[in-house]
Amino acid sequence: QVQLVESGGGLVQAGGSLRLSCAASGRTFSNYCTGWFRQAPGKEREFVAAISGNGMATYYADSVKGRFIISRDNAKSAVSLQIGSLKPEDTAVYYCAAAPASIGSVVTAWQLYDYWGQGTQVTVSS
């Protein structure tokens, strides 16, 4: 079992930035690819970014590339998502998730993620 707890969401004006954090506990954190997903009201869950277990590989959705940065600290069992140049369409609940994967692999399909946090709300005002 891996437990994930997100924090750092909030209300921000368009163009602003936030740093989302995800604290993990349980099994060896580096054995898991960690990803961020988001879901806006009435929309399907959307992949945002993911980072491999060793932190050497990352992958971003086209919609956030160049604006969001994912990072992890395995010593602290933590992953962060720096989100910048925010747009109203970035408004959503953001979820941290963990997927078992080979150490250098990135997983983008939400169906392959076994563990999920409770989510943190990000609201971007225009």
Image (cartoon, rainbow, N blue to C red):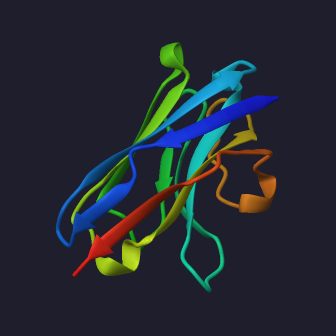
The answer to whether residue 79 is left or right of residue 97 is left
Quadrant occupied by the C terminus: bottom left
The answer to whether residue 124 is left or right of residue 103 is left
Quadrant occupied by the N terminus: top right
In the image, what residue occupies the spot 61% across and 83% down?
A: 43
Residue 17 sits above or below residue 100 on the image: below
Along the viewing direction, whichever of 61 and 39 lies nearer the viewer: 39
Along the viewing direction, whichever of 119 and 58 lies nearer the viewer: 119
Q: Is residue 97 in sight in this rendering?
A: yes
Residue positioned most to the top: 75
The answer to whether residue 20 is left or right of residue 50 is left
Q: Is residue 55 in sight in this rendering?
A: no
Q: Please state the horizontal and vertical placement of residue 21, each as a whole percent of the image.
A: 44, 39
Residue 107 sits above or below residue 55 on the image: below
Q: Please state the horizontal and vertical placement of residue 109, each as a whole percent of the image.
A: 71, 61
Residue 44 sits above or below residue 7 on the image: below
Q: Please state the horizontal and vertical placement of residue 96, each as a whole percent of the image.
A: 59, 47
The answer to whether residue 5 is left or right of residue 59 is right
Residue 47 falls in image quadrant: bottom right
In the image, what residue occupies the spot 62% across and 86% down?
A: 42
Q: Please state the horizontal and vertical placement of residue 103, each as a whole percent of the image.
A: 66, 29
**Number of on-image labels:** 0
Residue positioned most to the front: 11
Residue 80 falls in image quadrant: top left
Along the viewing direction, whichever of 7 and 85 lies nearer the viewer: 7
In the image, what residue occupies the spot 64% across and 36% down?
A: 4
Along the viewing direction, whichever of 54 and 1 lies nearer the viewer: 1
In the image, what residue occupies the spot 64% across and 58% down?
A: 108
